[in-house]
């Protein structure tokens, strides 16, 4: 997606009051304290260990670090993990 298309989608999202994650194809991450993390709209699991989870999304990767991670639910575009979440980082890859 080029820069112009991205700007247009952002404008449409705000003008029509649509959720940005849907229109811009972004992941939605919901946390419950530091105990649960629920990720929707990702493009695949790259790495899973008790200390780190890496997921692919349209613009790069999501890196979740912590301890004692346990995979509770895994569907094609959804993931539910329990454990101690210490950080969530977005690693953008320029295209």
Image: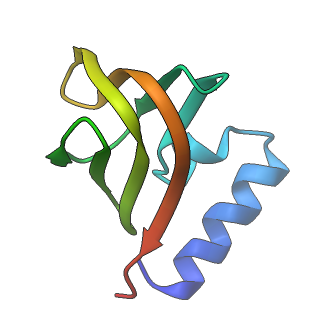
**Quarter-of-image position of residue 72:** top left
Viewer-proximal residue, 19 or 67? 67
Query: Looking at the picture, how far across and down is residue 93, in whole percent?
Result: 37, 81
The single residue placed furthest to the top in the displayed view is 72
Mark count: 0
Q: How is the image coloured?
A: rainbow
Identify the residue at image location x=31%, y=43%: 51
Question: Which quadrant: the C terminus?
Answer: bottom left
In this picture, is 4 found above or below 30? below
Identify the residue at image location x=55%, y=49%: 87
The single residue placed furthest to the front in the displayed view is 67
In this picture, is 14 found above or below 5? above
Identify the residue at image location x=45%, y=85%: 2
Query: Looking at the picture, how far across and down is residue 4, in whole percent?
Result: 58, 84
Identify the residue at image location x=39%, y=55%: 63
Q: Is residue 79 left or right of residue 83?
A: left
Viewer-proximal residue, 13 or 89? 89
In this picture, is 82 found above or below 89? above
Question: Which quadrant: the N terminus?
Answer: bottom left
**Quarter-of-image position of residue 40:** top left
Query: Looking at the picture, how far across and down is residue 8, in whole percent?
Result: 65, 71
Viewer-proximal residue, 70 or 57? 70
Q: Is residue 40 left or right of residue 52?
A: right
In this picture, is 78 found above or below 23? above
Query: Looking at the picture, how far across and down is residue 64, in whole percent?
Result: 42, 47
């Amino acid at each position: 997606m080029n820069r112009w298309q991205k700007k247009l989608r952002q404008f449409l999202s705000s003008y029509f009051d649509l959720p940005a994650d849907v229109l811009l194809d972004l992941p939605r991450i919901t946390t419950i304290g530091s105990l649960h993390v629920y990720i929707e709209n990702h493009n695949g699991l790259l790495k899973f260990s008790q200390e780190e989870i890496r997921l692919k999304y349209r613009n790069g990767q999501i890196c979740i670090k912590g301890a004692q991670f346990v995979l509770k639910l895994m569907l094609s575009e959804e993931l539910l993990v329990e454990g101690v979440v210490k950080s969530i980082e977005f690693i953008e890859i320029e295209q």
